[in-house]
Image (cartoon, coloured by chain):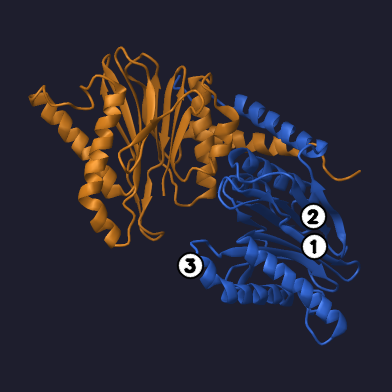
Chain colours: A orange, B blue
């Protein structure tokens, strides 16, 4: 399985993905699920993928190929050249649709799911920072102030904390803590989601990554957050009012 | 959907169930999912049900009918008369199997799932307090010290807190708080799980219910726990160490 989460708050975008994939519980591998594209001062994009790995890798490969082609042929639209984030989402959706139409039938015949989904986050110069969720059919939805986050994959374990904490006014720092705690809860409850993690933070209007790095299993800051959270949960739990009929 | 949770700790058994059922999002009803049987000083049983309501209601009706029949014919084995909790689980499993074999095919032909599952908790005089999970096929497993809880239905939202807090040494008071917080997280994240709740607490060797009551939407103690937990989560969250690279 996979757990990816993306938040869109007024201050920017925060994205976190695990790196574990599995074809059955006895066939576990590590693949990055976060792909980033950056032209500092012009455009910054991050894509997080879930679902059938051959489909999502194909989408990413074709988007990259499109960028190479666009470098030679300026008439060729690419995710780094189109005019709006909406059009970027359309391009990603179009490649998803193409991968599905070429491969889905054969994959499903093998008894495997071809479903896939992609989070797209980013900003282009002159536009707003945006977060999209692109489905297998190539259609997509956009995060709004009512729902400032999207999740992919094993989303339920880590949802309650996001529902409690995150609003569009949450700071980037709060948003990072929220995705860490959300991931931490998922890691504890589901074996098929695993470290290391990939983190990206995009500050509004900076048009570059504020943070883009891998968090390894022994990362002291992630461990500190995880331990502090465990302690806070235990303490909060101990301090709950009693229920027994008196 | 449904959320039911049962804990088995050294001090006893704690059970909590929601009461909302739905046949589609536009057809929501309230049905109790907790059924209790008690002969004080001799035996105390609680059954929590999930899945196809016609199946689980049929199982409960037949178990009750069996008790009536057993009152007239002492040779007829019933959940209130058999020698061990294991045999009680076998009787529940047998009624489940019978309901499935009589109804499953017709239900599935209508495009509806016939799956159902039951938590069985209780103690008979001279035995240990036990917790079983009975599946659609009538087979069952028993909670042990390694896994001191079972959940039915919409289990993922409320699992992280149980994984963090509950051990076989948790007190009944702690166990009650844990099931409340687990339910509270589920209620917040899933519309199809709803108040009121049914709570049962069985103290080890008491052979009667310590608590058996309905918790209504406006229950002040449940609200106090819910609010205290929200505050603790927010406070714990605010006190997390920062992650930003310094």
Secondary element at image label 1: strand
Structural distance between the alpha carbons of marks 3 and 1: 33 Å
Mark 3, other Cα within 10 Å: few <14 / some 14–19 / many ≥20: few
Residue bearing mark 2: B200
Q: Nearer the viewer, residue A108 or B130?
A: A108
* Residue at image point 49% right, 39% down: A183
Secondary structure beneath dot 2 equals: strand
- Asked where in the image residue B58 lies, by quadrant, the reply is bottom right
Q: Which mark is residue B36?
A: 1
The residue drawn where x is 58% and y is 35% is A161
Q: Is residue A13 left or right of residue B106?
A: left
Q: Is residue A121 above or below residue B139?
A: above
Q: Is residue A154 left or right of residue B2?
A: left
Q: Earlier in the sequence, mark 2 or mark 1?
A: 1
Residue lying at the far left in this picture: please name it. A72
Give the answer, above or below, for where B238 lies relative to A101: above
- Using the image, name the chain to which the residue with label 3 belongs: B
Identified at 32% across, 19% down, the residue is: A208
Residue A28 lies, with reference to residue A82, above or below; the image says: below
Which part of the image, by quadrant, shows the C terminus of chain B? top left
Chain letter of the residue beneath label 1 in the structure image: B
């Amino acid at each position: 399985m996979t757990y990816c989460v993306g938040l869109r708050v007024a201050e920017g975008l925060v994205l976190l993905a695990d790196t574990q994939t599995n074809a059955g519980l006895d066939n576990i591998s590590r693949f990055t699920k976060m792909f980033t594209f950056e032209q500092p001062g012009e455009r910054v994009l991050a894509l997080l993928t879930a679902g059938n790995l051959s489909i999502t890798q194909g989408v990413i490969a074709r988007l990259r190929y499109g960028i190479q082609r666009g470098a030679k042929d300026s008439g060729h639209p690419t995710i780094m050249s189109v005019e709006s984030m909406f059009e970027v989402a359309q391009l990603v959706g179009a490649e998803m649709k193409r991968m599905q139409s070429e491969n889905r039938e054969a994959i499903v015949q093998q008894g495997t799911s071809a479903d896939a989904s992609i989070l797209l986050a980013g900003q282009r110069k002159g536009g707003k920072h945006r977060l999209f969720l692109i489905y297998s059919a190539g259609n997509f939805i956009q995060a709004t102030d009512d729902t400032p986050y999207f999740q992919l994959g094993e989303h339920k374990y880590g949802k309650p904390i996001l529902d409690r904490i995150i609003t569009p006014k949450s700071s980037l720092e709060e948003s990072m803590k929220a995705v860490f705690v959300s991931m931490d809860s998922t890691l504890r409850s589901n074996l098929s989601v695993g470290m290391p993690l990939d983190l990206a933070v995009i500050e509004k209007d900076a048009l570059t990554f504020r943070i883009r790095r891998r968090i390894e299993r022994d990362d002291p800051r992630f461990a500190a957050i995880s331990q502090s959270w465990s302690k806070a949960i235990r303490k909060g739990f101990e301090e709950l009012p009693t229920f027994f009929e008196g």
